[in-house]
């Protein structure tokens, strides 16, 4: 039978608080693991999709580049046509890489739900000791 809160000794109260805090910390660690696992799984699927799409698009892109070089070679020497197309392709690639880097900087991979509950837990523990 549970004793009422007023009948428990200070040692029993601290023991209960310690047990509850330990349980809470374990649950928070499990929540963080679950949340990060979900985020990593989603990112992994997205990266795989991008890689396959990129490989297919790359094959088509190479065909287009070859066609542009052949087209320009009608009016320019072959080496100049290839150089012009190469510079344009390299500049476009650089711009796309920079855009991707900027977009990745804004992705939040932190376990926001866990951080929020940890703040709540700290407040709860503070109230328990008052």
Image (cartoon, rainbow, N blue to C red):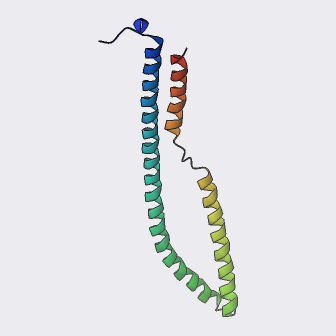
Classify 57 as above or below 71: above
**Residue 13 in view here:** yes
- Is residue 75 among the parts visible in the rendering? no
Q: Position of residue 53 (x, y in %)?
A: 46, 68
**Residue most toward the left?**
1
In the rendered picture of this protein, how many numbered marks are placed on residues? 0
Q: Which is nearer the eye, 83 or 41?
A: 41
Q: Is residue 64 above or below residue 120?
A: below
**Residue at screen point 48% across, 73% down:** 55
Report x, y in % for residue 38: 43, 48
The residue lying toward the viewer, choosing from 114 and 47, is 114
Residue at image point 43% right, 53% down: 41
Q: Residue at x 61, y 49 (%)?
A: 106
Q: Position of residue 16 (x, y in %)?
A: 42, 20
Q: Indicate the quadrant containing the C terminus: top left, top right, bottom left or bottom right.
A: top right
Residue 124 location in percent, x, y?
Answer: 51, 22
| Quadrant of res 52 | bottom left
- The quadrant where residue 91 appears: bottom right
**Left or right, 5 with reference to 80:** left
Q: Is residue 55 above or below residue 122?
A: below
């Amino acid at each position: 039978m549970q004793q009422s809160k007023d009948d428990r000794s200070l040692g029993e109260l601290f023991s209960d608080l310690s047990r509850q805090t330990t349980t809470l910390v374990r649950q928070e660690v499990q929540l963080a693991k679950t949340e990060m696992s979900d985020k990593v799984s989603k990112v992994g699927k997205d990266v795989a999709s991008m890689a396959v799409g990129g490989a297919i698009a790359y094959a088509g892109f190479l065909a287009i580049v070859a066609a542009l070089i052949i087209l320009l070679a009608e009016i320019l020497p072959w080496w100049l046509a290839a150089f012009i197309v190469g510079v344009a392709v390299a500049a476009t690639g650089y711009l796309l890489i920079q855009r991707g880097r900027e977009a990745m900087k804004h992705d939040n991979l932190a376990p926001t739900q866990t951080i929020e509950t940890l703040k709540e837990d700290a407040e709860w523990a503070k109230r328990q000791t008052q």
